[in-house]
C-alpha cells in the first residue's frame, strides 16, 4: 500500500469521524431535550445512514468503470469506515449472503455479535 493510499484513507477517516461525532452529539442532544429520553438516537441515526450510504456508494462504484481507487479509499474505506464500522459489518454480511452459502452469512452475523458482546463483557 502506498503512502498516497494511506493519506486518502486518513483524510476520509478524519472527515467521517468528525461527521459521526457532530451528528451523534446534535441528534442525541436534541432528541433528549425534546423528549427527555436518554437514548443514543444519534448513534442509531449514524449507523442506519452509514449502512444505507455505504451500500449506495458500493453499488454506484461497482456499476462504473474508471473510478480511481483513490475515490474508493477516501469515501468507502476512509469516510464510511470512520463514520460507522457498523455500515461495513452490515455490507459485508449482505455480501456473504449474496456470494456464498447463507451459512457463512449467518455465521458471520452471529459470530460477530457474540464476539463483540464477549469483548465488552471481558472489558468491563
Image (spheres, helix red, strand yellow):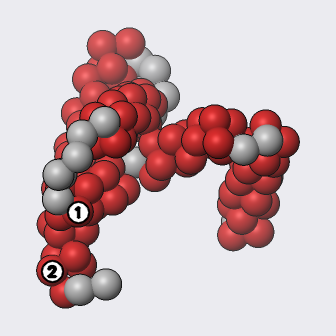
Indicate the quadrant containing the C terminus: top left, top right, bottom left or bottom right.
Answer: bottom right
Q: Residue at x 40, y 48 (%)?
A: 84
Say few, some or many: other residues with alpha carbon within 10 Å of mark 1 (under 14 / 14 to 19 / 20 or more).
few
Q: Residue at x 17, y 59 (%)?
A: 68
Q: Tell me if I can see residue 48 in this picture.
A: yes
Residue behind mark 2: 4
Q: CA distance from mark 2 to mark 1?
A: 11 Å
Indicate the quadrant containing the N terminus: top left, top right, bottom left or bottom right.
Answer: bottom left
Q: Residue 81: give its label.
A: none
Residue 94 screen position, x and y as percent: 60, 36
Relative to the observer, which residue lies in front, 34 or 111?
A: 111
Residue 32 screen position, x and y as percent: 36, 23
In the displayed image of the protein, which residue is found farthest to the front?
A: 65
Q: Secondary structure at mark 2?
A: helix
Q: Residue at x 26, y 23 (%)?
A: 30
Q: Secondary structure at mark 1?
A: helix
Residue behind mark 1: 69
Count of number-bearing discs: 2
| 46 lies left or right of 86 | left
Amino acid at each position: 500500500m502506498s503512502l498516497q493510499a494511506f493519506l486518502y484513507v486518513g483524510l476520509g477517516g478524519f472527515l467521517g469521524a468528525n461527521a459521526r461525532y457532530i451528528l451523534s452529539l446534535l441528534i442525541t442532544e436534541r432528541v433528549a431535550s425534546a423528549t427527555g429520553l436518554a437514548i443514543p438516537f444519534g448513534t442509531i441515526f449514524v449507523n442506519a445512514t452509514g449502512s444505507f450510504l455505504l451500500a449506495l456508494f458500493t453499488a454506484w462504484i461497482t456499476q462504473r468503470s474508471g473510478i480511481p481507487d483513490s475515490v474508493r479509499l477516501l469515501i468507502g474505506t476512509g469516510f464510511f469506515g470512520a463514520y460507522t464500522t457498523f455500515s461495513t459489518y452490515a455490507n459485508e454480511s449482505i455480501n456473504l449472503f449474496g456470494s456464498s452459502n447463507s451459512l457463512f452469512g449467518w455465521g458471520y452475523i452471529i459470530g460477530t455479535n457474540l464476539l463483540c458482546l464477549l469483548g465488552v463483557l471481558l472489558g468491563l
